[in-house]
Image (cartoon, rainbow, N blue to C red):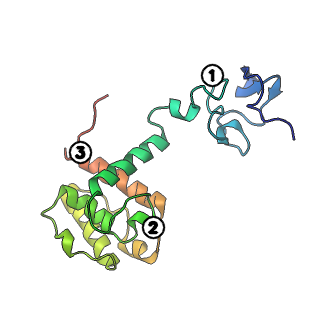
Amino acid sequence: MGRPLWAGTGQWGRAPLGRAVADGEAAAAPVGSGARGSPARRGCGEPTAPGPVCSTATGPVPHLRRAGGPATVKAMLLEWCRSRTRGYQHVDVQNFSGSWGSGLAFCALLHSFFPDAFDYGSLEPGARRHNFALAFATAEARVGCAPLLEVEDMVRLSVPDAKCVYTYLQELYRCLVAKGLVKTKKR
């Protein structure tokens, strides 16, 4: 097997059709195409976008150069959920799947905004159907959050689908911002 495209002297250039070249070698697929083995699918320190790329291991990490990318938004949303639910019993938000399985994380998140909506202390981790129904109904009634998740679907799965939970939380956040309950920094 030949040496990886990103190894060598670090002299990167642009070839026709948007392909990156190093030391005279051509990439297998256009940069950013997402094809397996293409630079866009490789790890830290490798080319991900047209233009100059770091030439040594000490240079900037390409995926961190794009402020506000999907990974950054996802991490920020997870941290926001974690900070809003910190201190709630039976809630430890670590991800967008298992952390939301009992429904208590949804309830804690909403309770942090609407403490008068329900008695969080009376909720039980095993009452998943009740917890999901309470959280989704509260979100819809208090902030107009679209019911993107079905209680039955959430109860059927022992570990919720991370993409579904993430999408719902994005919508909940958007609704809270629209109601003026979450302040965002102006750009």
Does residue 140 appear in this view? no
Q: Looking at this view, is 99 or 140 the one in front?
A: 99
Q: Please, what is the three-letter code of the amino acid marked with disc 1?
A: Gly
In-image side of 83 versus 49 (left or right)? left
* Above or below, comparing residue 4 to residue 147 in the picture: above
Does residue 84 appear in this view? yes
Under circle 2, the secondary element is loop
Pinpoint residue 38: horizontal percent, then vertical percent: 72, 39
- Residue name at image x 20 percent, y 71 percent: 121
What residue does disc 1 label? 51
Any mark on residue 182, and which? 3
Any mark on residue 160, and which? 2
Q: Please, what is the three-letter code of the amino acid marked with disc 2?
A: Pro
Pinpoint residue 91: horizontal percent, then vertical percent: 33, 65
- Residue name at image x 76 percent, y 22 percent: 9
Q: Marks 2 and 3: in contact by CB < 8 Å?
A: no
